[in-house]
Amino acid sequence: MNRVVVDSSVLLAVIHQEQGSEKVTPELLTRAIISTVNLAEVQGKLLNWGWLPEDAWADATGSVGEIVPFTIEHARAAGNLIGETRALGLSLGDRACLALGLALKAPVYTADRSWKHLKLGLQIHVIR
């Protein structure tokens, strides 16, 4: 099974059935891995939009195949990515997702079009 890493923007697009979510098939989601940092982003966004905490957590965790803790190695890699991502304004969550993709040598999926400009030696799929 080929694993893929998903950014919080992908999971939110799927939950809300936004443009591009049709590219994120159920089969892809079963192979999908998300960082706990990105999962926290999804939970927070859903709560801000008025969801109940239990419902938000169920929807955030129920779609992806695997949830991976944010490790010391991921923290270092995410911090090191600041130079390559500063001009695009990527957040800590964005860099956490990229760090996980680099660590796993797995393709990364995002809804953020600016990621197309990254040159990290990592396969990036933009769903919009």
Image (spheres, grey):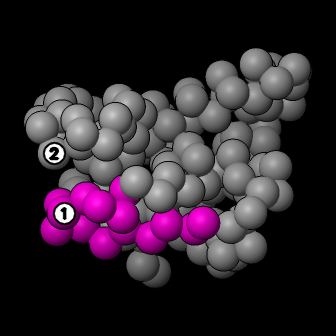
Residue 128 at x, y = what percent? 60, 66
Does residue 2 appear left or right of residue 87 in this picture? Answer: right
Viewer-side residue, 2 vs 25: 25
Few, some or many C-alpha atoms within 10 Å of disc 1 (few <14, some 14-19, many ≥20)?
few
Specify start and end residues of the magenta stretch as a single range.
115-128
Label 2 crowd (10 A; few <14 / some 14-19 / many >=20):
few
> Which residue occupies 71% across, 53% down?
13
Q: Which of the two residues, 42 or 32, is positioned nearer the viewer here?
A: 42
- Horizontal and vertical percent position of residue 18: 78, 57
Point 45% across, 70% down: residue = 125
Secondary-structure class at tag 1: loop
Which image quadrant is residue 115 in?
bottom left
Tag 2's secondary structure?
helix
Q: How many circles with numbers are drawn on the protein?
A: 2
From mark 2 to mark 1, how far is it between C-alphas? Answer: 8 Å
Q: Is residue 24 magenta?
A: no
Residue 5 in view in this figure:
no
Res. 103 in view: yes
Q: Do residues under tags 2 and 1 come within 8 Å of each other at their CB atoms? A: yes
Q: State which quadrant residue 46 falls in.
A: top right
Q: Is residue 119 within the magenta segment?
A: yes
Q: Is residue 110 left or right of residue 99?
A: right
Give the answer, above or below, for where 108 lies relative to 97: below
Residue at (53, 62) in percent of width and height: 32
- In the picture of the structure, the residue carrying the numbered disc 2 is 84
Residue type at mark 2 is: Glu
Q: Horizontal placement of 92 versus 105: left or right?
A: right
Name the residue that disc number 1 marks. 119
